[in-house]
Amino acid sequence: MSKTDDEFLYISEMIDSTDKINNLIDKLFILLIKQLDEGKNFDKMKHYLNICITLSTRSTDDIFNWLNENQNESKYVLFLGIFYYYNILNLDKNTSNKGFKCLIKAASYHLILQLYL
């Protein structure tokens, strides 16, 4: 089995189509951090996140709206900022400024998040 096959298997086992949206987002966040820790580039990370979203029963709009409405935890602020900054959800072409503001806000909550800026 190739490394790509192993990664896809990991992703498909991680995502459950019956997950509540907050559980799905937590799993996506874990995947994001794992990808960052492994030094994956953002194109590959965007690809994996989109695969996960496709495997779930949620739309990108559902995820974006939930993140936008649930900014009570720094991980959700960070995640929304990354989605904006790297346009992971293909929202529009001018999202990097919104993303940077979210990333700065998240980093102000936790110094460790500054490593990802």
Image (cartoon, rainbow, N blue to C red):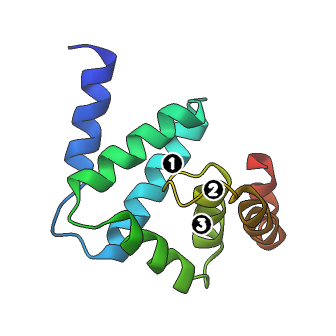
Image marks 2 and 3: residues in contact by CB distance under 8 Å? yes
Task: Return the residue at label 2.
Answer: 82
The type of residue carrying mark 3 is Leu
Instruction: Tell me where residue 110 appears, x and y as whole percent.
Output: 77, 67
Q: Which residue is mark 3?
A: 80
* Residue at x-position 19% and y-position 59%: 16
Picture residue at 37% right of the left edge, 74% below the top = 62
Per the model, the C-alpha gap separating discs 1 and 2 is 9 Å
Residue drawn at the location 27% of the way across and 25% of the way down: 6
Q: Is residue 109 above or below residue 103?
A: below
Where is residue 25 drawn, in percent x and y? Answer: 41, 66
- Give the residue furthest to the front: 93
Q: Amino acid at mark 2?
A: Ile
Q: Are marks 1 and 2 in contact (CB under 8 Å)?
A: yes
Q: Which mark is residue 76?
A: none
Which label's residue is closer to the chain start, 1 or 2?
1
Q: Give the crowd class for mark 2: few <14, some 14-19, many >=20 residues within 10 Å.
A: many
Q: Is residue 74 left or right of residue 8?
A: right
The residue wearing badge 1 is: 32
Label 3 residue SS: helix
Q: Amino acid at mark 1?
A: Leu
Label 2: which secondary element: helix
Does label 3 or label 1 sit earlier along the sequence? 1
